[in-house]
Image: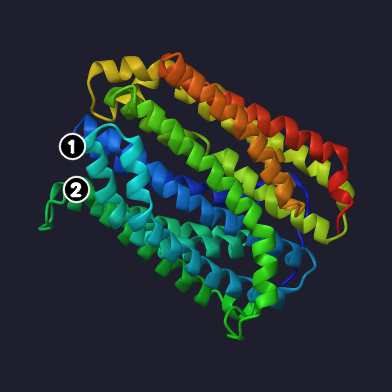
């Protein structure tokens, strides 16, 4: 099996489209959760915003590890060394399990203290904490799930992503409906039913994808579990590449949680509207994140082939496709935004408050469509400390902006969501400058 990639539009689309589908399905799950929880009332919809972002903090830690391992796997794929790919995957699995257990421990010890100090509503606080106690047990399943992402995307087996994500979607929708409202003979668990449904769905997706990997023979091709001996030098190497990304993504989502806490100070309606914006970012940003993941893998693979001169032309091709796809989705979003908002079953003022926020989010989505590509190009070069530096500088400006607008000047949440423009402008300007400077070529 030749694992070396080409830089044609066909190769880019062949990788990105299955990834798009694999990203779209979890976003459909998020929206399904939100719509079902919206049926329980505005408070539940508001609480879902905080619980969703809280779980995202740990999810992006897994994604940071995923991207680090994916970059290393793609580099070995570019060098056409399949046996070393299995070695990296095996050690990535061990690291992910340990980190997930730490996440569970923090949720039961540190998180309640922080949430108590920041959430003003006692009802929302209790609902959020009880939900998190249940939801966090799905973290080990999720981390193993993202490790399969690193393997399949890093080796250009993206078409196989579809089976796991399909299984996850079917199980999530069924158990959301069954457990939140008590249908099909199941107990009526209300808000917490969404937590149990998500865990079951993650377990189903994980099981299906590993069955697919087994029957496709990838475990033999990449020697996934032939050697059970732990190599601490390999663990050190993975952590060295992944830890800046883990910290980068964690800081980003922790800052977003801070943003949602400031939104909570503006009332349940503002928080409920903002929770839907998280859904919109997820589903309408699908192509941007898919092309970003493609950029990471392809840049690393091409560098592994010693074809550095093709990196910048490759990035420009991916940017073109990403902007076109995101532009089409954003146009659809703005034709009838009230139709999308009506799915959440809220009062008319919810739609009135949400439409101007959608306009701001649409501009941010377009900025993300090219900014995320350039940022992931930096990841693909293996210079993950540069990613972290870019993130930290950008977040400083982001925090200052959100604090002044939402807390000091007490402006409308539409202005608060303008923070996304600040964020993506900072990410693009620095990552674009770094890649164009050629400094990434200096380090081997």
Q: Is residue 356 visible?
A: yes
Q: Residue tagged by mark 2? A: 180
Query: How far from the left and from the top, in percent, is residue 254?
Result: 49, 42
Residue toward you, 93 or 73 = 93
Residue toward you, 88 or 215 = 88
Do the residues under discs 2 and 1 have CB atoms within 8 angstroms?
yes
Task: Say which residue appears at 37% left-offset and 20% top-offset.
Answer: 354
Task: Say which residue appears at 55% left-offset and 69% top-offset.
Answer: 95
Q: Is residue 201 visible?
A: no
Query: Helix or strand or loop: what does disc 1 sit on?
Result: loop
Relative placement, left or right, of 37 versus 87 is left
Q: In this view, does 406 lie above or below 58?
A: above
What is the crowding at mark 1: few (fewer than 14 residues within 10 Å), some, or many (at least 20)? some
What is the crowding at mark 2: few (fewer than 14 residues within 10 Å), some, or many (at least 20)? many
Q: Residue tagged by mark 1? A: 40
Q: Give the mark count.
A: 2
Tell me the quarter of the image containing the C terminus.
bottom right
Relative placement, left or right, of 164 versus 265 is right
User: Disc 2 to disc 1, how far (Cα)?
Assistant: 9 Å
Q: Describe the colour scheme in one phrase.
A: rainbow
Tell me the quarter of the image containing the N terminus.
bottom right
Query: How far from the left and from the top, in percent, is residue 247?
Result: 59, 50
- The quadrant in which residue 236 appears is bottom right
Task: Say which residue appears at 57% left-offset and 78% top-offset.
Answer: 219
Residue toward you, 166 or 301 = 301
């Amino acid at each position: 099996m030749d694992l070396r990639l080409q830089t044609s539009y066909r190769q880019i689309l062949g990788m990105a489209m299955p990834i798009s589908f694999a990203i779209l399905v979890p976003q459909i799950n998020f929206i399904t959760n939100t719509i079902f929880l919206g049926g329980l009332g505005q408070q539940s919809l508001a609480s879902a915003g905080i619980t969703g972002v809280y779980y995202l903090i740990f999810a992006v830690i897994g994604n940071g590890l995923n991207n680090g391992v994916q970059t290393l796997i793609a580099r070995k794929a570019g060098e056409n060394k399949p046996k070393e790919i299995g070695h990296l995957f095996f050690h990535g699995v061990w690291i992910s399990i340990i980190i997930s257990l730490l996440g569970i421990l923090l949720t039961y010890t540190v998180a309640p203290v922080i949430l108590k100090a920041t959430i003003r509503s006692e009802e929302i606080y209790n609902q959020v904490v009880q939900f998190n106690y249940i939801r966090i047990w799905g973290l080990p399943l999720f981390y193993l799930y993202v490790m399969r992402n690193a393997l399949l995307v890093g080796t250009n087996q993206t078409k196989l992503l579809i089976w796991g994500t399909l299984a996850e979607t079917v199980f999530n929708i069924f158990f959301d409906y069954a457990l939140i409202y008590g249908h099909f003979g199941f107990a009526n668990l209300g808000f917490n039913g969404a937590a149990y449904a998500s865990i079951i769905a993650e377990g189903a997706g994980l099981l299906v994808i590993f069955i697919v990997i087994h029957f496709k023979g990838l475990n033999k091709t990449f020697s996934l579990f032939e050697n059970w001996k732990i190599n601490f030098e390999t663990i050190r190497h993975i952590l060295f590449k992944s830890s800046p990304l883990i910290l980068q993504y964690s800081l980003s989502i922790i800052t977003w949680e801070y943003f949602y806490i400031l939104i909570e100070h503006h009332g349940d309606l503002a928080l409920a509207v903002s929770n839907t914006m998280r859904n919109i970012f997820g589903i309408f940003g699908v192509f941007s994140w898919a092309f970003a993941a493609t950029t990471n893998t392809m840049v690393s693979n091409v560098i592994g082939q010693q074809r550095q001169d093709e990196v910048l032309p490759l990035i420009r091709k991916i940017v073109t496709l990403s902007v076109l796809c995101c532009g089409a989705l954003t146009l659809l979003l703005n034709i009838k935004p009230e139709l999308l908002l009506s799915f959440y079953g809220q009062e008319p003022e919810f739609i009135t408050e949400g439409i101007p926020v959608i306009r701001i989010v649409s501009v941010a989505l377009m900025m993300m469509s090219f900014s995320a590509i350039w940022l992931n190009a930096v990841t693909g070069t293996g210079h993950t400390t540069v990613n972290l530096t870019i993130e930290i500088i950008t977040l400083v400006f982001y925090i200052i902006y959100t604090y002044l607008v939402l807390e000091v000047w007490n402006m409308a949440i539409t202005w608060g969501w303008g923070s996304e423009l600040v964020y993506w402008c900072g990410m693009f300007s620095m990552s674009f400058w770094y890649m164009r400077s050629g400094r990434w070529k200096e380090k081997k």
